[in-house]
């Protein structure tokens, strides 16, 4: 079975072909550099860029793969930026009609969860945490066909506050990777807990905007006193965030008793988050680093699994 996966929900255009679980084509065009000067993604520009990138990727696809041998086309249907999602849909629909091959809509967040299945086995029931620039949420995955949203962020997403705090520190967008790098390499921190833990009515929900405000105020205060050391600050921030997330996973695992824990999405590339792997007695599955950010392979993989398990699509 040969499946084409198309991803265009945010600022990455990506095509991947999966043939019997093996990735035989995987290409991505990222718009990060284009949006960098605005400090965030501009949806209108993103839509236009996707239109250009789809054509380039399709030309490469045609060169490397016999497109008539495709069995199905999967595309990201939601959630994401409306314009970019629409471009992806129209492209996928046009191709599906032209090739007379079935077209399937895929949920982007389920895609992130199944990104770990590209090279690992998810044990069910699983608990999945999706952490990205737009989402921070837990799912209880009873089986590959039944994912239930358990909790989510009440305000900002974790990647979003990494980006906003990074901006304040003078780093380019998206700043998650830069903060992570500084935190990882910093031998020192401020030797005290700088942050207060937010309270949520549902203890499994997240709240990141209060942490963001505390961080921005702290940066101001430390700068005024000439005491701001970016490495130390990033280390304090990252230690706090990973501990906050660890406690939430621990509690969710206690309640849901999963056989495995999946951590996926852009922020699953984070060093401290990846280190949580060793803190649990059940398998903690993380995507290969090249599949933490948005990609077509996870979209194709989601369809492959759902077709194999005869899930309703
Ligand atoms: O899933 P993703 O590629 O895009 C969507 O949000 O849909 O996630 C991007 C987010 C950005 O906020 C970026 O700063 C964050 O993931 N990120 C990281 C790291 N790498 C990417 N955050 C913390 N540590 C990282 N190493
Ligand atoms: Zn994503």
Image (spheres, helix red, strand yellow):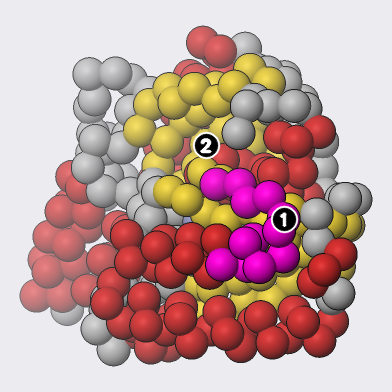
Q: Is mark 1 within 8 Å of ligand 2?
A: no
Indicate yes or no whether the magenta region holds residue 95: yes
Of the numbered discs in the image, which one, if any, rests on residue 101? 1
Of residues 60 and 286, the one drawn nearer to the viewer in this rendering? 60
Q: Which residues are magenta?
A: 94-105
Q: Secondary structure at mark 2?
A: strand
Is residue 92 visible to the viewer in this orientation of the structure? no
Position of residue 211 in the picture relative to residue 257 (left or right): left
x then y, percent, for residue 109: 51, 44
x then y, percent, for residue 259: 72, 19
Q: Is residue 23 above or below residue 254?
A: below
Q: Secondary structure at mark 1?
A: loop
Q: Is residue 104 above or below residue 197?
A: below
Quarter of the image for residue 200 reads top left
Mark with earlier residue (2, 1): 1
The residue beneath circle 2 is 129
x then y, percent, for residue 159: 39, 57
x then y, percent, for residue 123: 77, 25
Q: Residues within 10 Å of mark 2 (few under 14, many from 20)?
A: many
Q: Is residue 225 above or below residue 217?
A: below
Quarter of the image for residue 28 reads bottom right
Of residues 101 and 205, the one drawn nearer to the viewer in this rendering? 101
- Residue at position x 56%, y 13% in the image: 256
Q: Residues within 10 Å of mark 1 (few under 14, many from 20)?
A: some
Position of residue 187 in the picture relative to residue 222 (left or right): right
- Residue at position x 73%, y 48% in the image: 301
Of residues 243 and 248, the one drawn nearer to the viewer in this rendering? 248
- Residue at position x 34%, y 61% in the image: 81
């Amino acid at each position: 079975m040969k499946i084409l996966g198309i991803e265009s929900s945010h600022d990455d255009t990506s095509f991947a072909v999966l043939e019997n679980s093996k990735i035989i084509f995987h290409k991505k065009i990222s718009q990060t550099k284009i949006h960098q000067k605005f400090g965030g993604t501009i949806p209108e520009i993103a839509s236009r860029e996707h239109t250009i990138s789809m054509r380039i990727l399709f030309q490469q696809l045609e060169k490397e793969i016999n497109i008539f041998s495709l069995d199905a086309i999967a595309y990201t249907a939601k959630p994401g930026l409306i314009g970019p999602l629409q471009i992806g849909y129209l492209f996928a629909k046009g191709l599906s009609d032209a090739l007379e091959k079935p077209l399937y809509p895929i949920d982007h967040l389920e895609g992130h969860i199944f990104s770990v299945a590209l090279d690992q086995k998810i044990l069910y029931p699983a608990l999945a945490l999706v952490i990205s620039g737009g989402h921070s949420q837990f799912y209880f995955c009873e089986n590959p066909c039944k994912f239930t949203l358990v909790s989510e962020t009440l305000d900002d997403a974790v990647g979003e506050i990494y980006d906003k705090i990074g901006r304040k520190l003078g780093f380019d967008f998206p700043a998650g990777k830069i903060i992570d790098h500084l935190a990882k390499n910093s031998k020192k921190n401020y030797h005290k807990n700088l942050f207060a833990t937010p309270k949520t009515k549902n203890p499994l929900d997240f709240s990141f905007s209060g942490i963001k405000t505390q961080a921005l105020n702290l940066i101001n205060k430390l700068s005024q006193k000439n005491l701001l050391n970016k490495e130390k600050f990033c280390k304090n921030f990252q230690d706090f965030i990973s501990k906050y997330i660890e406690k939430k996973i621990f509690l969710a695992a206690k309640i849901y008793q999963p056989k495995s824990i999946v951590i996926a999405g852009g922020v699953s590339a984070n060093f401290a988050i990846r280190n949580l792997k060793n803190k649990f007695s059940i398998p903690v599955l993380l995507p290969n680093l090249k599949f933490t950010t948005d990609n077509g392979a996870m979209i194709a993989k989601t369809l492959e699994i759902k077709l194999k398990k005869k899930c309703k699509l």
